[in-house]
Amino acid sequence: MLDLADVHTYYGNIRALRGVSLSVKPGEIVTLIGANGAGKTTTLRTIIGTVRPRRGTVAFDGHRLDTLATDRIVRLGIAQSPEGRRIFPRMTVMENLELGAFARRDRESIAPDLERVLTLFPRLRERLAQKGGTLSGGEQQMLAIGRALMAKPALLLLDEPSMGLSPILVETIFRIVEDINRQGTTILLVEQNARMALRVAHRGYVIQTGRIVLHDAAAELLRSDLVRKTYLGEK
Amino acid sequence: MSARRTLLVAAVVAYPFVDRALGLQTVHAVSDGMIYVLLALGLNIVVGYAGLLDLGYAAFFAIGAYAMGLLNSPVVGSPLYGHPWSFWLCIWVAAAVSALLGLVIGAPTLRVRGDYLAIITLGFGEIIPVAIRNLGDITIEIGGWRPIERLNLTGGENGVNPVGRPYLPGVPFETDPVPWYFLILVIGALSLWAMSRLRDSRLGRAWMAIREDETAADCTGVNPISTKLLAFALGAWFSGFAGSVYAAKLQAITPGAFEFQVSIMLLCMVVLGGAGSLGGVILGGMLITLFDRVVLTQTTSFVRAVGRATGFPALAAVDLTLWRWFFFGLGLVVVMLVRPQGLAGRRVGPVAVPDDDDEVALADAAPAPRVEAIPAWLRERARPDGAPTPAALLEVRGLSKAFGGVVALSEVGLVIPPGAIVGLIGPNGAGKTTFFNVVTGLLRPDTGRIAFAGASLVGLRPNAIVARGIARTFQSIRLFPQLTALDNVLVGQHCRLTAGVAGNVFRPPAVVAEERRARERARDLLAFVGLGTKEAEAARNLAYGDQRRLEIARALATEPRLLLLDEPSAGMNPRETETLTELIGLLRRELGLAVLLIEHHMEVVMGISDRITVLDHGVRIAEGPPREIQRDPTVIEAYLGSGYEQDVAVTDR
């Protein structure tokens, strides 16, 4: 469904990705784990088209993404919940969610999807008329995920969905990730919380300084020494 | 002095003589250019350093010029008729008057930023020329009594003419442009020297911190009000110099010389050359004036000559100087497209880098904090000073805060004993960050009291609270992105330094020593948090984990007794989180620093907190030691979740 082949991405002269190859098959949850600065967010940015690879290809359902503009990529069925809560701060929660569905053509099924998002995040329902910028950090995180879901994507890119959320919400978020996946959305999940991510994912990739160093079934990665020491913090 | 600099000085000194030998006659134009450069440099303090967009800067130019004109004119009707003051006195008076008006215009703009500030300065820029025009004929009538009748204060539309020249024995200011050139050069060079010293001082850092993030600067101990006023006053001071020299050189001033387009042209010089760069502003100012005064006029005569020679009357009548605004506009658009940071502006690396640090070895990504690395001076400060230790360092009682109808905090109480680590947890949106914002002075509580070391904090500005000894970090990192790591930490030292404007310009030994000590301390702190090799890196270019640690170093630089950390481990992996936990523990153990910690990583909170307060919907639902909190059914229900017990098992191992 999604295929990255030998992707090299630069910021100026700094090499952020040095030949990343990974694939996501329909119906999967795939997680990408790695330290800060390893290139996880850059990988997502390269897929969604906010940075361009200098070498290599990104393909999605037979379309080449690495030459398409971001809005076209989104119309192909990919949505991203960006890291750092990039919501629209001066628009209401409702408007933020409605904008998530901006590129959709199936207008009549938007209402049920809104209902679904508000059921997943009851907190957002309480705050529908509030400006996005007045939400607390964790609430903004929920809004960013909710907005991505409103696009009803075939492929959902999640960048650290658990960041800044309370333990109970972290659990909820991962349960939601599994739910969405069961309902047919393919997911590429970037997470610092490697333990939780690997618990819900089918497969995982480990990225270090711009290269994929390990790739396996999630259950296997949970048992791997490298992952346990480096990313699970076990002694 | 470097060879390049010697060469530059020689060229600048030799230039007027070369000009005369070659018969170029450009000294007048270049001297005028230098006056505009001086103005642009003054504006650079306001716009480039402090980041306050000023669209009416020509007003200060006018005030400087009229101060000179009115005090140093033999003309009939001027208030000092018959007793003009000396030029050498007037330039100081002009600078002081301008600076004073800088304060006056600065005051109403303190609470506004961006568009609003620009509009206010625009208004001020319009008011001054209009006022000058109308103060040429003042009559005040009170019921038939006219204390002032037809007083001509400013010369109205006609301006002041003539204005007295400077007098130096044997120097022909009347006939020769060269002495003017050198006079302006000396004033300009001295101003430049003073400005560069200010830039590299505690004040320069404070201006740039305000420019980068005013709230973060306030919470790092920089007083935004006095810092911004000072930028306005000093910017105006230098334009007072420029205006007064301009008036004396031109021998006459009219209100038309200080219209809106002058402000815009000055702004163009700053932006074209590169806001915040002294060299760039000089370059921009010279380019624009010389293009206007030399290139356009010469090209016009050239084109006319060509037209006459070839018999094209259209070319022979061309006047390119009428097109100057077209060329300015075009040039500015091109520069902004090609080099948005200006011709000489510093390029501060790629925008989106926090995720791409080159070749980071994993071991270095999160260096473990070492006891030996704790700066000795911090230890020194932490030593008890014999004063009786209060039972509570921070004592919050009955704190409430509502936003419109939404109650964010309701009757919250919290006590932090000296040297204790207190965790503040709760569901998202429970009011934890609001609590921080109230304690640090960003928000005013509706009711309740906050006492720090026995004294109330309510009503104090954030920077005053920092000075009392409370420092904080932010949930979404708020560094000064364009400043280096070292400068970020140095801003933290701001409230512990005392040098004023004169001290920073003339640098007596005490100031030099103070600055050296601040730098040593800042470097110590960078080394302590593991950023010793990255001091020259712009904060925005640091990896995420590095930014988090830099924020802690900046907070420590304010020399706090209480540290407020807002989700310090958000976005960190387990390994980095572990290092962070060690760091916080170390600060308490070795330095006796008290910490209030908002955190969602339970292995951090439960591991190091002495006590924990739990908020939900703005209400305190639990308080106690970690063991009790993690078994409290209310807390499990609202916050921890049932799956938490598994994780407890993991962390207890």
Image (spheres, coloured by chain):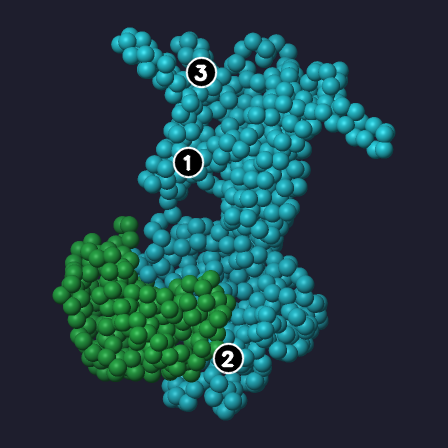
Q: Is residue B230 visible?
A: no
Reading the image, the residue beneath label 2 is: B426
Q: Compared with residue B285, is residue B432 higher up or lower down, i.e. above or below?
A: below
Report how far apart the C-alphas of labels 3 and 1 lie in the structure. 23 Å
Report how far apart the C-alphas of labels 1 and 2 lie in the structure. 50 Å
Q: In the picture provided, is B271 more to the left or to the right than B628? A: left
* Along the viewing direction, whichever of A31 and A226 lies nearer the viewer: A31
What residue is drawn where x is 52% and y is 77%? B430
Q: Earlier in the sequence, mark 2 or mark 3?
A: 3
Element on which disc 1 rests: helix
Label 3 chain ID: B
Label 2 chain ID: B
Q: In the picture provided, is B468 more to the left or to the right than B627? A: right
Chain identity for the colour cyan used in the image = B
Could you tell me the amino acid type at mark 1? Leu
Give the colour chain A carries in the figure: green
What mark, if any, has residue B26 been given in the picture? Answer: 3
What residue is drawn where x is 66% and y is 24%? B156
What mark, if any, has residue B272 been given in the picture? Answer: 1
Report how far apart the C-alphas of labels 2 and 3 lie in the structure. 72 Å
Discs 2 and 3 carry the same chain letter: yes
Element on which disc 3 rests: loop
Look at discs 1 and 2 and give the one toward the viewer.
1
Quarter holding the C terminus of chain B is: bottom left
Could you tell me the amino acid type at mark 2? Gly
Q: Count neighbours of disc 3 (C-alpha within 10 A) and say few if under 14, some if 14 to 19, many if 20 or more.
A: some
Label 1 chain ID: B
Q: Quadrant of residue A219?
A: bottom left
